[in-house]
Amino acid sequence: MIMRVLYVTSEIAPLIKTGGLADVSAALPAALIAAGVDVRVLVPGYPQILRALPQLNDVALFALHDFPCASLLAAVLPDGVRIWVLDCPELYQRGGGPYQDEHGHDWPDNAQRFGLLSKVAAVLGSSDSSLGWKPDVVHCNDWQTGLTPAYLHFANKAAPCVMAIHNLAFQGVFPPDCVAELGLPAQSFQMEGVEYYGSLSFLKAGAYYADHISTVSPSYAEEIQDEALGFGMQGLLAQRHEVLSGILNGVDYTEWNPGCDTRLAQEYTAGDLRGKLANKIELQMRMGLRVDPEVPLFGMVSRFTFQKGLDLVLEIAPELLAMPAQLVLLGTGDADMQRAALELLHKYSGQVGVYVGFNEELSHLVEAGADVFLMPSRFEPCGLNQMYSQRYGTPPVVHATGGLKDTVVDCNVATLADGTASGFVFSPADADSLLLAVRRAVDAYYDKKIWHALQMNGMSKDFSWGKSAAAYIEIYERLMRR
Ligand code: ADP
Ligand code: GLC
């Protein structure tokens, strides 16, 4: 019998994306389908999604608890993935982003918006659903779907569920009155339930009630069981360690591959790197940098937040630029960090390029046109850009944390000798050790033999989704046997 999985997510590339979850939500369902699983992806009906999918068919209508009426619309994405769009204009039809308005403030009704998404997923995963298609497993992602396992727990004949944690720093914490408003049983509001330090936490609910918890790298699965990165949930996660797995994200090489990336100035392969230089020059011109094929060019594409360590890059910028080197920053987020990045741009014009905003095309050009990729994240559940940059022949400088430490091999005598060196790994996450790693990268850059070896090692790595999809299928099978 074919296994059926309902995959619930709050973003999916290229339709709506704020970060890595969107890339994963596009690629993992496709990889599961390729492995023979029957998947439906459930997403909120944001305007960006409704506009992009004109061919939608009505599938079901929901009038649930105190939520506004919503309908389920079905479509098939160009890659064959079947998507279910939850249309509820009152909650999802608005400008701004999926979680925040255009000024960066959280939508005040986020509890209702993602409560409804979670609730509908649970209805679809239980005998309350009127649809013929019933999932064997429900796969939830991040806090926006965190109430699904709770609703399923109290539903009839519920499918087992996996709670995938992509980032424990975002938990979806709301006032206690939301428990009743969202139709959760009063008895669920306790430590052995959805309660988290006196509030309702969507992600805690998911981690508590899910049949299995997954996260996006083996190292992060360990780290979140400790105080430093457990964000208050380390106790629960350690207690549930037997049903907690760390499965590394993959890379969608149909999207992220310099050999067939139409967003680049010129495509290139490991066998012929000449096109990479054309991208460097294009990037220098686009970002107002002095055109110079020789100078080492550092690139960063990131949400501008404390997590990502942009402040560390800004702190070492004077030394980095004096090496000499150039720096390109692409990102958006924290207002102070944006301001500081723009100040740097004005101080070092011709040497620094900054783009504040979200720009998919430019992100590909930075991966290809930079010589070194910067990812000094203080913590990083998985991280995708360091995997992309290795495929683009752009060795990354990363902090030894989470998925960064699981996917980048530090360059040293031993790893150069055994052919595994693929970047520069530093610790602790402070400016001094970042600067040291940057110096090592520049030294290596000027040694043509070492640099070429690093590029080849990175480019030949295989981070494709097949292995990770198989690991999820194994978990689904285990849950179905129970
Ligand atoms: P996170 O999900 O924590 O932001 P990841 O490394 O997993 O980090 O994924 C980030 C994704 O978002 C990557 O595909 C990256 O290229 C993309 N991205 C982040 N910021 C921007 C931006 N300003 N413009 C374009 N793409 C961006
Ligand atoms: C989160 C994490 C990032 C991860 C992504 C996709 O946003 O911050 O490390 O790669 O989710 O799983």
Image (cartoon, rainbow, N blue to C red):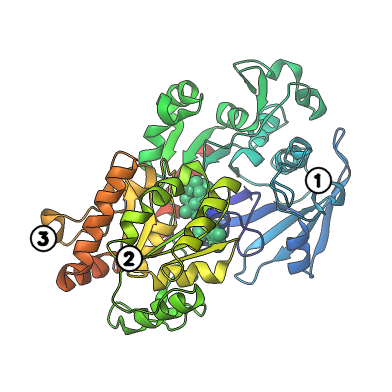
The residue singled out by tag 3 in the image is 417
Location of residue 294 (image quadrant)? bottom left
Q: Nearer the viewer, mark 2 or mark 3?
A: 2
The disc, 2 or 1, on the residue closer to the chain's N-terminal end is 1
Local packing at callout 3 (Cα closer than 10 Å; few below 14, some 14-19, many 20+) is: few
Q: Amino acid at mark 2?
A: Ala
Which element is circle 3 on?
helix
User: In this orientation, which residue lies closer to the viewer: 1 or 425?
Assistant: 425
Disc 2 from disc 1: Cα separation: 61 Å
Location of residue 358 (image quadrant)? bottom right
- Asked if 268 appears above or below 314 in the picture, the reply is below
Which element is circle 2 on?
loop
The count of marks equals 3
Mark 1 C-beta closer than 8 Å to ligand 2: no
Q: Amino acid at mark 1?
A: Ser
- Label 3–label 1 contact, CB within 8 A: no
The label shown at residue 401 is: none
- Asked if 187 appears above or below 225 in the picture, the reply is above
Residue 359 x/y as whole percent = 58, 66
Residue positioned 35% across, 42% down in the render: 401
Which element is circle 1 on?
loop
Residue positioned 54% across, 58% down in the render: 342
Residue positioned 49% across, 72% down in the render: 287
The residue singled out by tag 1 in the image is 130
Q: Amino acid at mark 3?
A: Ala
The residue singled out by tag 2 in the image is 325
